[in-house]
Amino acid sequence: MNLYLLAPEISLCALAIVVILLDLFIGRKWILGVVAVAGLIVPAAFTLALWGVNETSFNGMLVVDQFSLFFKLFFLVIAALVILSSTDYSFKFSAFRGEYYALVLLSAMGMMLMASTRELISIYIAVELTGISLYVLAGFLKDPKSSEAGLKYLLLGAVASAVLLYGMAMVFGLSGTTHLNEIAASIPAGGLLANPALLMGIVLLVAGFGFKIAAVPFQMWVPDVYEGAPTPITAYLSVASKAAGFAVILRVFYEALGPLSLDWGIIFAVLAAITMTLGNVVAIAQTNIKRMLAYSSIAHAGYLMMGLAAVSTLDPGALGPSGPGALVFFLAAYALTNLGAFIAIIAISNKIDSDEISDYSGMARRAPILSLALLFCLISLIGIPPTAGFIAKIYIFTAAVDYGLIWLVIIAVINTVISAYYYLRVARVMYLGTPLSEERVPSSWALRAALAFACLGVLFLGLYPWALLRIAETAVSIFP
Amino acid sequence: MLENFGYIGIFLIAALGFAISTITLPILLRRFHIVPKKPNPVKSSTYECGMDTVGKSRVQFNFRYYFYALLFVVFDIQVVFLYPWAVALGELKLFGFLEMLAFFSILIVGFLYAWRKGVLEWK
């Protein structure tokens, strides 16, 4: 047992405790946000110091490799951006700021554990640690919509956990072990059709994890929860929670169920096609921008699942990156883009106290920089150059073509065209509509810094994607 | 694998047999007049050897008990962990001691939190 391998998580937990204690004993609450963001440097430094290590600990339950370290850093950066963007929002729950920051940190810790466990029960505990913090955060505002969001997320999340556990029990029953690498060794020959119980186990696992990543048909909670939850938490859910789900899926399906990749690859391909189509088509009808981005997040879960469907093959003639590599790159690009969009929305909604798209009319004149940032992020969500979204889509489509999923790529391209309609509608309202008032939209320096980081990141990845792609490929190179 | 499920099958049969026999045996004994039927008010009361109930069963508790219940659960779990730890402390040595100290300090943060938030005051 080597505690140093767990140093990022331990330091993050300690940071959350420090935030709670500070909240109890100091009067000036703005210090909490500063401590929470500045303190994230410690776990991030530990993560960077561990880079290159490839070891397991705690009887093989915890694994530290490039994949888990990449995701740890990823979650820490997102947590920092979410906390920064919360500074303009926290007046709505000023009495509970300490709890809010602590819960954000604790759920980030759960996500970090999700990315670095290779044992089913530890995965389940990490999923719950993330989930329970997020259930509370979703219901953090005391209005009916937020309470509805929290309760809905809690109940549906509990059902999803039960399904996930049932799937794990099935897999455990057939293999006699909860360690992913040992499960892989004990998968019976003859494919899934000869082993209906294993098929059922896999389907249940897909359902349980599908809830986390908001894949159709497990997406019912997404619009209501995203609309009701505090906007920074909506951003957090749509980015970090989804990424953690994909990290766990990659880990479980490649390490434990790798021999069956032909079978689950097709499951993910079909789910991807349904998910992106439903998400994009329903998003057209939305009038609330948070609901619209919720459906957009469902649609993006579909694009992301293409990376799961395009199972990595060691084909030297491949045109582009491997499926998982493209998936990890897409996650990073999507994270920055979506965070940027939500941060702009936080600032604008604070001023106009509404999330309706029609109230954004003429926003370009009231908040030129925020509107430009939002437009830039929406363009990246469509996938137009020179943004990260464009490169990410190119990579993931290429990976799918390499794997022979031409039909899926055609559906995805059609979906991209559909999505342009509803993203650009927001841009039209902002730039061509008449302003409802002439008042400027204020924003704090913390929020501006987070927005600038996100937008510059989107631009940087759009112009110079190779560095991150190389890191992404290194991260997923641990999978056979 | 199948043998293990066989044990479960035996338990299942035994459990079902017990349940069925305890329900049907008194009925059968009564039907064949082996057991006489002589009711009296004490016998047919709800709790033959307990107190008679008073009032409605739907009593409203003060909401504050909820916080005490929550705190109780936390410290209950602490005690549950303490017993096996105390038994095995000789083998766990210093590491086990420090680990329990870390666990305690986290729980104490929770207790401090409840205290500072005024949960322990009965206003």
Image (cartoon, helix red, strand yellow):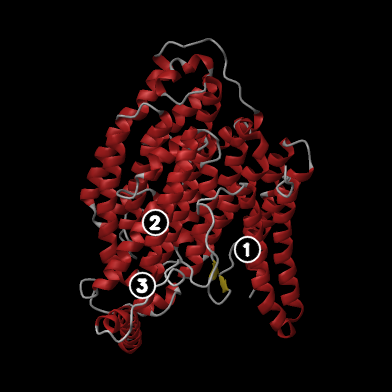
Q: Chain of mark 3?
A: A
- Residue drawn at 55 percent across, 77 percent down: A59
Identity of the amino acid at label 2? Ala
Would you say A84 lies left or right of A165 here? right
Query: Badges 2 and 1: C-beta atoms under 8 Å apart?
Result: no
Chain to which the residue tagged by mark 1 belongs = A
The residue nearer to you, when weighing B121 against A245, is B121
Q: Are marks 2 and 3 on the same chain?
A: yes
- The residue that mark 1 highlights is A50
* Closer to the eye: label 2 or 1: 2
Q: Quadrant of residue A378?
A: top left
> Horizontal and vertical percent for residue B70?
62, 56
Q: CA distance from mark 2 to mark 1?
A: 33 Å
Task: Please rate how many residues cluster around mark 2, counting C-alpha atoms within 10 Å: few if below 14, some from 14 to 19, many from 20.
Answer: many
The tally of labels here is 3
Mark 2 vs mark 1: tell me if same chain. yes
Which of discs 2 and 3 lies nearer the camera? The answer is 2
Residue type, label 3:
Val
Indicate the position of residue A185 as horizontal and vertical percent values: 37, 79
Which numbered disc flags the more N-terminal residue, 1 or 3?
1
Residue at image mark 2: A160
* Residue A279 screen position, x and y as percent: 31, 40
| Secondary structure category for the residue under label 3 | helix
Which residue is located at x 29 percent, y 84 percent? B29
Image coords of residue A315 (percent x, y): 31, 64
Q: Residue furthest bottom?
A: B3
B88 with respect to A420 (left or right): right
Label ID, residue A171? 3
Q: Is residue A333 visible?
A: no
Residue A323 visible (yes or no): yes
Position of the C terminus of chain A, as image quadrant, is bottom left
